[in-house]
Image (cartoon, helix red, strand yellow):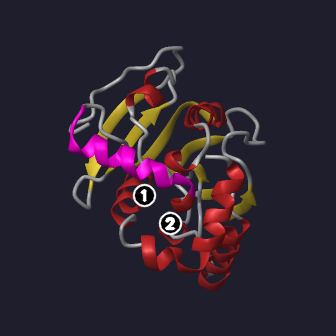
């Protein structure tokens, strides 16, 4: 999906995003942050920070940078930071995740929650996540990935794909092509509630050129 389409969709969603999607995405956010918060004093990039729902839940010793394609969503995130007095947010910047302006190896941890199905080129985003993450650093991806075997679920996801521009996301993106050529180590793959609709992938930015691919249960 072209970035202008995404911006238009989230311009419509911005005012109701927390109400409509907040609860559905809560498990993915919380499980990801629980893992990150087990460590101390990290510089973290959250790609697709949106309205900043996750920002209050990072431990205060972390330093957070957030980017999003939607200025309307970022404005809400900035208001949240101000109202809650969150002091460890370094910046919230409008930026295309496919062409980030950060220097190589800028962050200890890179997080992309519910992002891959709203971008035009998920592989370009994956390459950027790896580029800006330090060698040996962690990359967390939370997303819905489509079925990779024929069946009712795959048919339904392909049907929904016809409405991608209206919805602002596409449902027919499989996991394997995204990860198999990324040159990263897959640490864990976990299904998330509700109903296993979403998946958390914890990757490590390996120093080696090749990655290790694990089979995701239920794909």
Name which quarter of the figure residue 12 lies in. Answer: bottom right
Residue at (38, 66) in percent of width and height: 26
Q: Residue 28 placed where, x, y %?
A: 37, 57
The residue pinned by badge 2 equals 54
Q: Is residue 151 above or below residue 75?
A: above
Q: Does residue 209 show up magenta in the picture?
A: no
Which numbered disc flags the more N-terminal residue, 2 or 1?
1
Front position in the image: 112 or 57: 112
The residue pinned by badge 1 equals 33
Magenta span covers which residues? 150-165
Left/right of residue 67 with respect to residue 215 in the rendered view? right
Left/right of residue 178 with respect to residue 80 in the rendered view? left
Q: Is residue 66 visible?
A: no
Name which quarter of the figure residue 154 lies in. Answer: top left
Q: Secondary structure at mark 1?
A: helix
Q: Residue 88 placed where, x, y %?
A: 64, 66
Q: Is residue 41 visible?
A: yes
Q: Secondary structure at mark 2?
A: loop
Decide: few, some or many residues near mark 1? Use Cα within 10 Å; few <14, some 14-19, many ≥20.
Answer: some
What is the C-alpha distance between the residues marked 2 and 1? 8 Å
Magenta stretch, overall SS: helix
Q: Does residue 163 show up magenta in the picture?
A: yes
Q: Are marks 2 and 1 in contact (CB under 8 Å)?
A: yes
């Amino acid at each position: 999906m072209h970035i202008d389409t995404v911006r238009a969709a989230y311009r419509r969603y911005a005012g109701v995003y927390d109400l409509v999607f907040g609860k559905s995405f809560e498990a993915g956010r919380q499980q990801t942050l629980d893992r990150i918060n087990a460590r101390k004093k990290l510089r973290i990039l959250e790609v697709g920070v949106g309205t900043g729902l996750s920002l209050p839940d990072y431990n205060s010793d972390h330093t957070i940078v957030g980017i999003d394609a939607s200025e309307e969503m970022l404005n809400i995130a900035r208001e949240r930071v101000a109202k809650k007095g969150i002091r460890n947010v370094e910046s919230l910047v409008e930026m295309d995740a496919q062409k980030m302006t950060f220097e190589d190896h800028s962050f200890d941890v890179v997080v992309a929650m519910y992002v891959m199905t709203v971008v035009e080129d998920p592989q370009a985003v994956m390459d950027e996540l790896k580029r800006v993450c330090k060698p040996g650093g962690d990359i967390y991806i939370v997303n819905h990935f489509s079925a990779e075997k024929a069946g009712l679920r795959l048919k339904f996801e392909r049907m929904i794909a016809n409405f991608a521009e209206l919805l602002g996301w596409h449902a027919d993106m499989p996991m394997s092509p995204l990860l198999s050529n990324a040159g990263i180590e897959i640490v864990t793959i976990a299904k998330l509630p509700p109903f296993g609709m979403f998946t958390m992938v914890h990757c490590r930015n390996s120093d080696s050129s090749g990655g290790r691919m694990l089979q995701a249960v239920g794909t």
